[in-house]
Image (spheres, coloured by chain):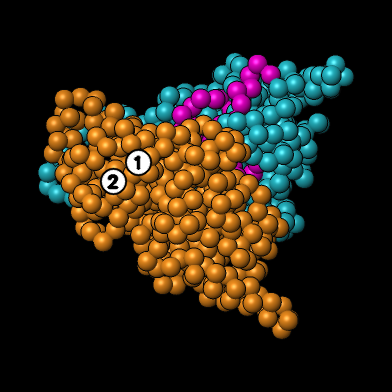
Chain colours: A orange, B cyan
């Protein structure tokens, strides 16, 4: 029931996904009266869904603490419960991110060895590939240990969701030289260099390197990460808006648009946010995927793809194993010093 | 001598500026052999310049501490000395930002009541106006007192350089609710609410609000500020690159470009970074303006415009007065509590 165009885009997204993946079935948590009419024209979902009816839902502006306390019968809570109880392999929500994280943390609990679950996403870069980026905003203050865990989880996500075998890691900073930044970024750099990730660690990356695609995984605290990602989103919208205005400026430019539109659309598709939709609340005992609230059916379909791929790749088993190996490698590096 | 296309673009920028401002004259610090040939075709500068010859310069990758120690005869250092000694009203440089700040701090010293000079710039927004943004990266860790001083200096800059009489202030954060963020952002919000800036304080702004132009001045620490601004720059470049590629995709799109280009260029001009070039190293006993290193003559001309306007508006007198009034207003608010 969460997201700007829910439940319509949720169900239509599932329907699109089901066309090519008949082995997947869906539990739909929410208001039956709103869900059923949409299912009428979603033929790929026939016999592939079960509705778990509830009239309760978490509003997009609900405080996480209140959502946690009062929302025990909400669609979001029931869906997370279903993952906890093994009735579902993964929850996908387009609703209130803060509430989703708060409820998931309490119900599913963090993975062993993970201090702070984070939100990881992938963003398009100039190489036509994707850059995995975390934390999107779950953790405001992050010390070097936390940032190190983010790096490990980011790599596991890059492998499971993107198929990048040995992801290159960058730590977001204000410059590339060793002395730049604050203690936490300098210390996580040292930890990565002393760990089994040494060969994958590329060094510091700056704000303009995000779009360049120099590295596969970018690690930062949730304060900087949230602001940076939203600034990128805002800039992308502003520039597309200005270009649209430019095309509407004269009759000649309108004709120009008609002639160029096929080629332009093909080119722009490489950075269409819908094809990158699907962030993961990573570091939890259960797979939790977050769709952008403004996603349409195509965007939500992509979030389902990400979710299914994470489950198939057993992302959480990988993270648990990786974090153990990584922490051992740091310890043995310290002993050898 | 600093910047990608120096000294050519510096002198040509001055020449462009001189066409409409015959009352301004220039001290040109650098290698005479490189400067003189360019002056040959810069007629507006005739009798309007003096060359202070030096072969020393600060390299773009020189560490600030080394630049400070070894660069005593560099063009940058001599230009800052000239401001200190009253031979120049303002220095404008396209060189190494870290070195410029380090040398300026030592030679010019911070203004009374200012703990940390910052770098302030203005960026285009969707309203077709500009948003003043600081700190661009001079100060990695900033407590609430420092952020408060940034707000005061940002407002003075908005008034002096942009002519915005009562700038609206926003504090960059991960959400708009009071409890969001870390202690420093929450405390600076409280300070602003209790000061003479109460009516100008708009609240928290998020990363995507930067482009929206909801506020005139955005305050953040230099770590987040540097990364955010570079991410914005990288995104803008990526999207323009993709659109250019789109236009080159087919013969039809090329014709489309020809038809639309006049209208598109007009529209894009509103966000052309050249017309926003000119950051200020604010909070120093002297006016120091920084041009983007990749600026061309039009960009550098704009940096000169900013510089002259800051001098004419007596920016530093304003800041000194404003910071005193602001700090007094906080004290009296605390006494009244």
Quarter of the picture containing the C terminus of chain A is bottom right
Q: For mark 1, name the chain.
A: A
Q: Nearer the viewer, residue A213 or B76?
A: A213
Please say whether residue A59 is visible from this viewpoint. yes
Regarding mark 1 in the picture, which secondary structure is present there? loop
Instruction: Tell me the number on the disc at residue A295.
Output: 1
Q: Residue at x 20, y 43 (%)?
A: A42
Give the residues in magenta.
Answer: B198-226
Tell me, yes or no, whether dots 2 and 1 are on the same chain: yes
Of all chains, the one bearing label 2 is A
Query: For mark 2, what is the residue?
Result: A13
Residue A20 in the figure: left or right of residue B284: left
Q: Quadrant of residue B162?
A: top right
Sooner in the amino-acid sequence: mark 2 or mark 1? 2
The relative height of residue A107 versus residue A238 in the rendered view (above or below) is below
Q: Residue at x 18, y 35 (%)?
A: A257
């Amino acid at each position: 029931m969460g997201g700007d165009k829910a439940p319509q885009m949720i169900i239509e997204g599932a329907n699109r996904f089901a066309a090519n993946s008949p082995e997947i079935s869906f539990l739909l948590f929410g208001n039956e009266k709103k869900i059923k009419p949409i299912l009428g024209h979603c033929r790929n979902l026939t016999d592939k869904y079960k509705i778990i009816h509830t009239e309760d839902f978490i509003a997009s502006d609900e405080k996480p603490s209140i959502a946690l306390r009062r929302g025990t019968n909400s669609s979001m809570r029931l869906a997370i419960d279903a993952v906890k109880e093994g009735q579902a392999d993964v929850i996908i929500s387009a609703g209130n991110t803060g509430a989703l994280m708060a409820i998931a943390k309490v119900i599913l609990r963090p993975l062993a060895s993970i201090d702070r679950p984070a939100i990881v996403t992938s963003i398009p870069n100039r190489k036509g590939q994707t850059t995995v980026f975390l934390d999107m905003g779950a953790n405001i203050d992050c010390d070097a240990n936390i940032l190190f865990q983010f790096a490990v989880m980011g790599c596991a996500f890059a492998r499971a969701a993107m198929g990048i075998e040995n992801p290159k890691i960058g730590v977001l900073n204000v410059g590339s030289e060793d002395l730049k930044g604050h203690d936490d970024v300098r210390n996580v750099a040292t930890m990565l260099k002393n760990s089994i990730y040494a060969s994958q660690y590329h060094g510091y990356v700056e704000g303009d390197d995000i779009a360049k695609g120099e590295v596969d995984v970018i690690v930062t605290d949730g304060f900087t990460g949230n602001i940076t990602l939203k600034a990128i989103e805002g800039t992308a919208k502003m520039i597309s808006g200005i270009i649209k205005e430019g095309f509407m400026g004269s009759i000649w430019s309108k004709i120009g648009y008609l002639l160029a539109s096929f080629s332009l659309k093909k080119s722009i598709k490489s950075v269409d946010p819908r094809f990158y939709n699907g962030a993961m609340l990573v570091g939890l005992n259960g797979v939790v995927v977050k769709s952008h609230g403004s996603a349409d059916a195509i965007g939500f379909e992509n979030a389902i793809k990400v979710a299914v791929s994470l489950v198939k790749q057993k992302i959480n088993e990988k993270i648990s194993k990786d974090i153990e190996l990584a922490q051992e490698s740091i310890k043995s590096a310290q002993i050898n010093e």
